[in-house]
Amino acid sequence: MWRKRNVGTRAINANVMVRYLTGDDPDQSARAQAAVDGRAVFASTTVLLESERVLRSVYGFAPEEVAVALRPFAGLPGVAVKNPDLLAAALDRAGAGMNVAGSLHLGAAARCDAMLTFDRRFIEQAQDSSVRMLAP
């Protein structure tokens, strides 16, 4: 089913978000800020995940630092994200050391009986969640 287009809203890619957050390239960072600040933009879940991966793998951010960077970005006036409650809960878990991707997976599984994973660290980190974590 097609939905009505959000006229005036532009989706951003991960490279725009990363330049906005890091300021590492003066020209592109200034252009990213001009594109985001005071404008209606949409950051998809996949863009947030890719930005998290780049911040961790390229810039060396810890999960807690990623949460500190993404939370204010998602709260900027004009910035829209899909499932803001799910994202907020995921960023809370990331602030405690879980990566954002795992945090989003865990939140998305809230209505499931269990989440199966071979990742023992993920199982340990998610023990306080309402989702039962199991190895297959």
Image (cartoon, grey):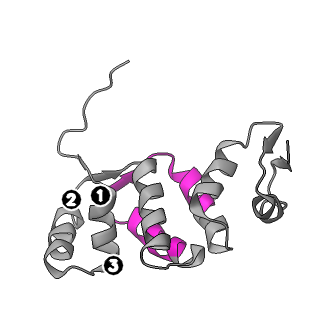
x and y percent of residue 36 in the render? 23, 63
x and y percent of residue 89 in the render? 62, 59
Give, as a three-letter code, the residue at label 3: Thr
Callout 2–callout 3 Cβ contact below 8 Å: no
Q: Is residue 111 above or below residue 22?
A: above
Residue corresponding to mark 1: 78
Q: Please tell me whether residue 2 belongs to the stretch shown in magenta.
A: no
Considering the whole magenta stretch, tell me its main secondary structure: helix
x and y percent of residue 59 in the render? 42, 78
Residue corresponding to mark 2: 39
Badge 2: few (under 14), some or many (20 or more) residues near its Cα, within 10 Å?
some
Task: Please state which of residues 53 and 105 is positioned toward the viewer in this rendering.
Answer: 53
* Residue 22: assigned label: 3
Q: Please tell me whether residue 87 belongs to the stretch shown in magenta.
A: yes
Task: Please state which of residues 26 and 44 is positioned toward the viewer in this rendering.
Answer: 26
Give, as a three-letter code, the residue at label 2: Arg
Badge 1: few (under 14), some or many (20 or more) residues near its Cα, within 10 Å?
some
Q: Quadrant of the N terminus?
A: top left
Callout 1–callout 2 Cβ contact below 8 Å: yes
Residue in the image at 64% along x and 48% along y: 105
Q: Earlier in the sequence, mark 2 or mark 3?
A: 3
| Separation of residues labelled 2 and 3 (CA atoms) | 19 Å
Task: Please state which of residues 115 and 77 is positioned toward the viewer in this rendering.
Answer: 115
Magenta part of the chain: 66-90
Secondary structure beneath dot 2 equals loop
Tell which tag, 2 or 3, sits nearer the viewer. Answer: 3
Residue 22 found in image quarter:
bottom left
Secondary structure beneath dot 3 equals helix
x and y percent of residue 106 in the render? 69, 50
